[in-house]
Image (spheres, rainbow, N blue to C red):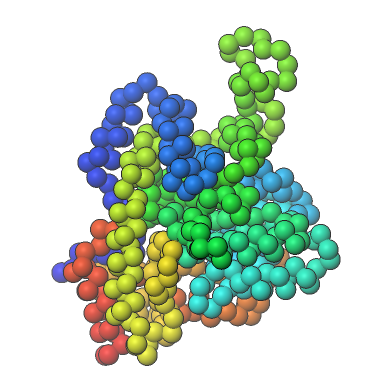
């Protein structure tokens, strides 16, 4: 019988184990040198000036919202097709979340719908936008930056799905997801199914030094021991100050060691993901049962490969019976009971809801073998030919 094929899966190598073991045997398990080493390497990888490692992607979003001084009466726009944390981070700070519909082919936030939403409210009503590089598809942040500047808004780029992803601007320059050129802040996740796995973990990138310093403070209870930042005279080597209300959102050193090791081969994984995506695309491109798919997009990081199909529930159940464990990404956030209590209802965002009714994420991870992928493809065909 076919061994289980999940939709996503971490890949841990001997080098990963050696890196973690070395750190476990060192003097630091947390707040040690591996954190800064990982941050420096990740900033270089994304071509951002600064990076701040945190405990997970949700913590990264929360700290970004805090650093941008989100508070009650702040109104922020994001997409309904994302994990709930992209919206929840604003609620954590007491702000209000507004959704705009998605582009029917990219599955990302539709900039025209965003502008229409902004124009439907009084001047100064909105504070910011959180576009999501959904499934690895890179949002055109240059266009969003222009829109944000026109209306005085900040941008948090949720790039959890897209390390290594990029778009090309009109000058022909490759703009990496999270490079800080267009977004005020960007965030990444190191959950096991992501490109870089730390078990849990996240990273914030920015080119703004003031925001960077605020993030360093906020991730550690709002506490600093930096002599240059102390507000009173230093009482001695033990002295520290809590200067604002922060959180314990630190990453451990052994997680950072694993992240560093995985970062060293992240581009190899990206090549494999693109090859897997191409195989899916070529298999399904002319099939009547396919109503949409991720396709082949230059710069796509392919955290997920999504197909849109009729009889999605029946296909999902059939594939599970064949030990293929696909997933659905995502239930629209506005249809969650928590957000329905705020007045959102079915029908508010028809393209997002149509997408949800048909979407299925196929197995996508670098160690997926050609034989396993062929089995997945054949099983999809078998279902629709029955």
Residue 377 is situated, as x and y percent measured from the top left of the image, at 27, 77
Please identify the residue farthest to the top as the structure is shown. 236
**How far from the left and from the top, in percent, is residue 43?**
48, 42
Q: Which quarter of the picture shows residue 374?
A: bottom left
Q: Name the quadrant containing residue 124.
A: bottom right
- Is 161 rendered above or below residue 350? above
Residue 272 position, x and y percent, is 29, 61
Return the residue found at the far right: 122
The residue at the point 63 percent across, 18 percent down is 227
Residue shown at 71% from the left, 70% from the top? 115
Tell whether 23 sits left or right of 204.
left
Residue appearing at x 76%, y 61% in the figure: 151
Q: Which residue is drawn at 31% across and 87% down?
A: 384
In-front residue for pair 285/60: 285
> x and y percent of residue 279 in the render?
28, 73
Q: Is residue 108 above or below residue 173?
A: below
| The residue positioned farthest toward the left in the image shown | 1
* In the image, residue 108 above or below residue 225: below
- Image position of 355 (left or right of 270): right
| The N terminus lies in quadrant | bottom left
> Is residue 386 in sight in this rendering?
yes
In front of the other: 157 or 376? 157
- Depth check: give the residue in front, 64 or 376: 64
Label count reads: 0
Whether residue 60 is visible here, answered yes or no, is: no
| Quarter of the C terminus within the rendering | bottom left
């Amino acid at each position: 019988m076919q061994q289980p094929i999940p939709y996503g899966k971490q890949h841990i190598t001997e080098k990963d184990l050696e890196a973690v073991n070395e750190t476990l045997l060192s003097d630091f398990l947390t707040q040690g040198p591996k954190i800064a080493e990982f941050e420096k390497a990740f900033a270089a990888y994304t071509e951002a000036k600064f990076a701040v490692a945190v405990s997970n992607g949700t913590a990264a979003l929360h700290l970004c919202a805090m650093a941008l001084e989100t508070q009650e009466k702040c109104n922020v726009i994001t997409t309904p097709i994302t994990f709930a944390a992209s919206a929840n981070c604003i609620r954590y700070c007491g702000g209000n979340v507004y959704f705009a519909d998605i582009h029917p082919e990219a599955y990302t936030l539709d900039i025209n719908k965003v502008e229409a939403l902004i124009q439907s409210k009084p001047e100064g009503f909105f504070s910011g936008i959180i576009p999501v590089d959904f499934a690895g598809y890179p949002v055109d942040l240059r266009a969003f930056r222009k829109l944000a500047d026109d209306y005085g808004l900040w941008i948090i780029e949720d790039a959890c799905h897209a390390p290594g992803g990029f778009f090309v601007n009109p000058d022909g320059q490759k703009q990496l997801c999270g490079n800080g050129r267009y977004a005020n802040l960007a965030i990444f996740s190191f959950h096991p199914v992501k490109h870089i796995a730390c078990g849990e973990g996240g990273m914030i990138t920015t080119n703004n030094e003031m925001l960077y310093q605020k993030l360093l403070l906020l991730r550690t209870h709002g506490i600093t021991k930096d002599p240059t930042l102390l507000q009173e005279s230093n009482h001695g080597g033990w002295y520290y100050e809590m200067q604002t209300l922060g959180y314990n959102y630190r990453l451990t050193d052994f997680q950072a060691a694993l992240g560093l090791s995985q970062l060293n081969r992240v581009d190899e994984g990206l090549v494999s993901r693109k090859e897997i995506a191409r195989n899916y695309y070529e298999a399904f491109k002319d099939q009547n049962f396919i109503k949409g798919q991720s396709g082949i997009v230059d710069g796509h990081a392919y955290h997920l490969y999504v197909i849109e199909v009729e009889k999605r529930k029946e296909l999902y159940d059939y594939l599970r019976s064949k030990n293929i464990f696909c997933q659905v990404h995502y239930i629209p956030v506005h249809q969650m009971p928590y957000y329905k209590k705020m007045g959102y209802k079915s029908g508010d965002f028809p393209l997002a809801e149509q997408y949800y009714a048909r979407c299925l994420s196929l197995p996508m991870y670098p160690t997926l073998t050609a034989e396993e992928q062929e089995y997945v493809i054949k099983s999809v065909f078998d279902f629709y030919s029955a």
